[in-house]
Image (cartoon, grey):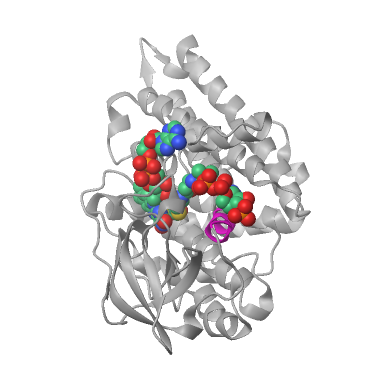
Amino acid sequence: KDLYESPDYYLADELLTEEHKLIRSTVRDWVKKEVSPIIEDYAQKAEFPKHLIKGLGEIGAFGPTIPVEYGGAGLDYMSYGIIMQEIERGDSGIRSTASVQGSLVMYPIYAYGSEEQKHKYLPKLATGELMGCFGLTEPDHGSDPGGMTTNFKDAGDHYILNGAKMWISNSPFADIAIVWAKDESGKIRGLIVERGMEGFTTPETHNKWSLRASATGELVFDNVKVPKENLLPNISGLKGPLGCLNQARYGIAWGALGAAMDCYDTALRYSKERRQFGKPIAAFQLQQKKLAEMITEITKGQLLVWRLGTLKNENRATPAQISMSKRNSVETAINIAREARQMLGGMGITGEYPIMRHMMNLESVVTYEGTHDIHLLITGLDITGEEAFK
Ligand code: TGC
Ligand code: FAD
């Protein structure tokens, strides 16, 4: 049997089109061939497998919903979700690279950029010829990005940018950065900052125990001269970066379920083969409880993201609905990873199986793109009308 069958307990495949299923098997085959055989090694070395960039572009993982005229794949949101699910089945770090490129770099240029910016950057970002990163978080402003201090001043024919961003996925190798900074009146604006601009550096963050196959770093701006044509003209305010996060959080809602499915598949297979006390461990009630709860949670999550995808296609998904799904999928995945790891006993802590890597990766996924608690507070605000952040 194919090692990468999707759990489909409620026949949710019937809710997908033939095109969706074709996209899923194409991405799944690519992940199986290109990611699974090498990913453990790269995670152990704490290195991003840069050679995967070209293939990610070819399978349409960069900006799947961006229209074809700008180099995107012009797909619907269900397809985007399915692509993220299959990539994250391989590794959350590789899905991160795709999320950042598509939702956090291409999307803001597409949604807020000028025609010149769209034609200049989007086609090259879609193939991976150019790679990007997204700078919102700062050392002193994570959950509260509105407090950012990175700023720029008008200096005639250019701007002067100062400040620093932290925890930025892809920063160590990105060619461009979408940087959110305050103008002289304190309004948040987006700038396209290019590698090579004087005073712009991207030091790498080392010693992570999570997302080891993804490169994370800082963005440091020391009087960087940014040409005026690099300002995203069509957005101002915190809703600019938060609008991009809606796209990325949607992809993570699907993606995290991919990691959960890989852990469940692995634990189910192992439990049927591993024998103790003369029986497969799958025959013991406690192990069945774990597996039964895993498939129940995966099935609930699948139905939630399918409905969210439908709403997203109809442009009706609210940010609060996206928050609920991101939070639910990541919690599902992290709990399944922890239980699945136990089911493998000692083998569960080794790199012979993917579970410990997924488990550690998910500790970042539960924190980035809005923490578990922040998403709960977004739901709390939505249902009560009472803001509990401040
Ligand atoms: P608040 O006053 O609520 O809102 C400010 C303005 O933004 C609007 N807004 C949104 N617009 C679009 N989409 C959303 N999701 C929006 N949420 C709010 C809002 O209507 C308002 O607009 P306007 O016109 O009135 O100005 O803002 P707040 O300062 O109270 O903060 C709210 C809070 C805490 C929910 C928000 O800031 C938040 O989500 N914090 C979490 C930060 C976060 O998610 N950071 C992620 C950084 S990027 C990342 O992690 C990438 S990892 C990628 C990878 O590797 O895969
Ligand atoms: P804090 O905001 O300091 O939160 C610490 C704790 O306090 C959390 O548990 C939080 O839930 C809680 N808390 C905060 N405020 C409240 C409140 N009002 N009520 C109750 N509890 C609260 N950022 C980018 O801009 N671009 C990227 O590409 C990017 N990639 C990342 C990659 C990795 C591997 C990681 C780990 C992070 C990345 N981030 C990125 C940053 C990420 O979005 C932030 O880490 C996240 O938003 C949380 O911010 P913080 O780490 O400063 O935590």
Q: Is residue 303 above or below residue 87?
A: above
Provide residue 113's location: percent of width, then percent of height. Answer: 59, 75
Residue 260 appears in the rendering: yes
Residue at the image point whose x is 44% and y is 70% from the top:
184
**Identity of the residue drawn at 58% across and 76% down:** 233
Q: Point out residue 356 in the picture as x, y percentages from the top left corner.
A: 34, 36
Ligand 2 image-quadrant field: top left
Residue 244, compared with residue 5, is above or below; it is below
Residue 361 position by quadrant: top left
Residue visible at 35% across and 67% down?
50
> 70 and 261: which one is in front?
70
In magenta stretch: residue 51? no
Q: Is residue 244 magenta?
A: yes
Residue 2 seen in render: no
Q: Quadrant of residue 378?
A: top right
Q: Position of residue 327 (x, y in %)?
A: 54, 36
